[in-house]
Every structure is written in structure tokens, then in C-alpha cells.
Amino acid sequence: TVGNALIAIGIIIMVFGFLGCMGAIKNKCLLLTFFILLLLILLTEVILAVILFVYEKQLDDYVKESLTRSFKGHLQSNSSKTWTTIQRNLECCGINGTNDW
């Protein structure tokens, strides 16, 4: 899930930070390793940002299609409670507005 991914990313960043601190204190090899790891993270983020920018329309269409499919079947499935909670908390109806009903 997204929560688990965020926890894993946080742990990885914490380890990288520890490597940076140890590299600054102990030796240049750890500091170089820290720099390379940070550079790889930066490159990964830039690549992901470019990919998301290029495929933004397809991703938007996919999410809308998935939400519409889930919304249309929400009365017959387990997602009914989820949709009710979302609509109550966000004070909205449907996906694009009240016309979805």
C-alpha cells in the first residue's frame, strides 16, 4: 500500500542520512557513497517527474475510468462504505459532481 511504501522510503532516506553523517565524521569513502546515493535518488525523481508529465493525460484517464467503474458498482460491493466515507468527508457527490448519480 501507499503507507507501507512511504514508510520504506522514509527508512531508506534515514539510512542515507546516517551514511552522510558517518561519512562526514569518519572517512571520505562513506561520504562519496552518500553523494552517489543522493545523486541516484535525484535522478530517479527527475525521471519519474518526466514520465508522470509525459503520461499525465493517460494517467488521468485511467484514474477517472477506475473511479467511475468503482462508483457505478459501489452499491453491490464492499467499496460502498469507502465511497460513503469519501463523499461525506469531502462533502461531494459522485466523481464529477451530482450528475454521476
Image (cartoon, grey):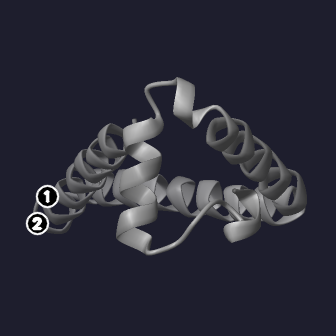
Visible residue check, residue 47: yes
In the rendered view, tell whether residue 4 sits above or below residue 88: above
Numbered disc 2: secondary structure: helix
Visible residue check, residue 97: no
Say which of 7 and 41 sits in front: 7
State the quadrant of the C terminus.
bottom right
Q: Is residue 70 left or right of residue 51?
A: left
Residue 53 location (% of width, % of height): 81, 66
Label 2: few (<14), some or many (≥20) within 10 Å?
few
In the rendered view, tell whether residue 46 sits above or below residue 69: below
Marks 1 and 2 close (CB-CB < 8 Å)? yes
In the rendered view, tell whether residue 17 sits above or below residue 74: below
Residue 27 location (% of width, % of height): 20, 57
Most extreme residue toward the bottom is 91
Residue 80 location (% of width, % of height): 45, 37
The CA span between labels 1 and 2 is 5 Å
Label 1: few (<14), some or many (≥20) within 10 Å?
some
Q: Which mark is residue 25?
A: 2
Please name the residue that numbered disc 1 is placed on: 22
> Which amino acid, by three-letter code, is at mark 2?
Ile
Q: Is residue 10 left or right of residue 24?
A: right
In the rendered view, tell whether residue 26 sits above or below residue 65: below
Q: Which mark is residue 64?
A: none
